[in-house]
Image (spheres, rainbow, N blue to C red):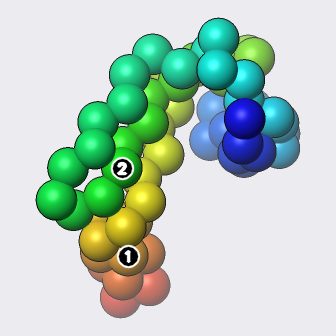
Amino acid sequence: MFDHVCTACSKRQLIFPSQVIAVTNGASGIHVAFTCWCGATQELRTGKAASEERRVALAA
């Protein structure tokens, strides 16, 4: 279980295992796809992939 702010409804919510669609563990980190309570499909990344996304977002 983890918390996440949905980009569709802007609410911080707890995400439960039953909402997880897919989990991929790769060399650049962990990628989790899940469905928010509002019905939107969301993605969460950790590790190098998340760091790179933050770096690109800050540079823009």
Query: In this orientation, which residue lies closer to the viewer: 4 or 18?
Result: 18
Asked if 21 appears above or below 9 in the picture, the reply is above
Residue with the most extreme bottom position: 59
**Image quadrant where residue 39 sits:** top right
Badge 1: residue crowd in 10 Å (few <14, some 14–19, many ≥20): some
Residue drawn at x 21%, y 62% is 28
Indicate the secondary structure of the residue bearing disc 1.
helix
Kindly identify the amino acid type of the residue bearing the numbered disc 1. Answer: Ser
Residue drawn at x 54%, y 20% is 20
Q: Where does label 1 land, which residue?
A: 51
Residue 18 relative to residue 57: left or right: right
Q: Nearer the viewer, mark 1 or mark 2?
A: 2
Asked if 27 appears above or below 25 in the picture, the reply is below
Residue 57, visible in the rendered structure: no
Kindly identify the amino acid type of the residue bearing the numbered disc 2. Answer: Ile
Quarter of the image with the N terminus in it: top right
Relative image position of residue 19 (x, y in whole percent) = 62, 15
Residue 12, visible in the rendered structure: yes
Relative image position of residue 25 (x, y in whole percent) = 28, 44
Residue drawn at x 44%, y 29% is 33
Badge 2: residue crowd in 10 Å (few <14, some 14–19, many ≥20): some
Relative image position of residue 37 (x, y in whole percent) = 75, 17
Relative image position of residue 42 (x, y in whole percent) = 51, 31
Marks counted in the figure total: 2
Q: CA distance from mark 1 to mark 2?
A: 12 Å
**Image quadrant where residue 36 sits:** top right
Dot 1 or dot 2: first in sequence order is: 2
Residue drawn at x 64%, y 20% is 17
Q: Where does label 2 land, which residue?
A: 30
Residue 35 relative to residue 54: left or right: right
